[in-house]
Image: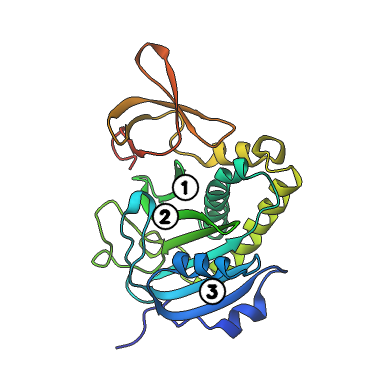
Amino acid sequence: MSIPTGREPLRQADLEAVAPPAPWRFEVVTETESTNADLLAAAAEGAAEGLVRVAEYQRGGRGRLDRSWTSPPGAGLTFSMLLRPGVPMANWGWLPLLAGVALADTITADTITADGTPARLKWPNDLLLGPRQQKAAGILAQVGSGAVVIGIGLNVSSTLAELPVPTATSLGQHGGRLDRAGILIDFLATFATGYRDWQAAGGNAQVSGLAERYRGHCATLGQPVAVHLAAEILQAEAVDIDDDARLIVSLEGGVRRAIAAGDVTHLRPGTG
């Protein structure tokens, strides 16, 4: 059986040859339990910022809210990056949103899907594609040993039969780019630019322009949403993102509430 386009094995030497400027360094493995767990362990051992671990297959991948993330070997881009931000930890909550913005910019720069819809983000950082705004990628940030590890799972060439749920999609399903190595390198270059600007602003998302860029990508704002929390479900309108990267929703009567963590569902038909 021939290897589908986009599933050629990733090679560490190839990535290093075209890598954007420091601090990026690569480790490519055929299989691992979790690239995030691998880098959290590396952080505990003192690994420097910029280590990127890429896996062709991740046995125990997890997403936000401890959900599983699965993808056939070679069908997706699964990686984590280790960061040691030089800004107050109170501002680190913006990093997964920055990763989402960089990923949306990378995908949209290469190809606006055949239906003409650019990549969008569901708060905080799910990548959505197409008019039905189906999920193509998830991002998970974890903190440990003075570092932030950001893991990304992007469905690249996954077929309909390989996608885990009907609400998921892949770049291939929208005529998107299938060059996994090129996507990774372009993402890291885009992320690095935003990361430098954010750090130069002391982690202030407003001053660095990150907050404005995120709002421009966020499909959740202006939507009626259901927010699933540990003890309740809120139905509200998503109206803004605050300085701490929390989602601001407007409840019945105009009362506003800040959501730091929760599962958000868009309630308009076809919006994911």
Q: Quadrant of the C terminus?
A: top left
Q: Residue at x 45, y 54 (%)?
A: 140
Name the residue tied to disc 3.
181
- For the residues labelled 1 and 2, the Cα–Cα distance comes to 7 Å
Residue 211, how many percent across, how many down? 61, 37
* Relative height, residue 167 to residue 75 (above, below): above
243 to the left or right of 40: right
- For the residues labelled 3 and 2, the Cα–Cα distance comes to 18 Å
Q: Are marks 1 and 2 in contact (CB under 8 Å)?
A: yes
**Colour logic:** rainbow
- The amino acid marked with disc number 3 is Ala
Q: Residue at x 53, y 83 (%)?
A: 11
Circle 3 sits in a helix, a strand or a loop, which is it? helix
Q: Residue at x 41, y 66 (%)?
A: 156
Name the residue tied to disc 1.
125
Mark before the other along the chain sequence, 3 or 1: 1
Name the residue tied to disc 2.
138
Quarter of the image holding residue 163? bottom left
- For the residues labelled 3 and 1, the Cα–Cα distance comes to 22 Å
- The amino acid marked with disc number 2 is Gly
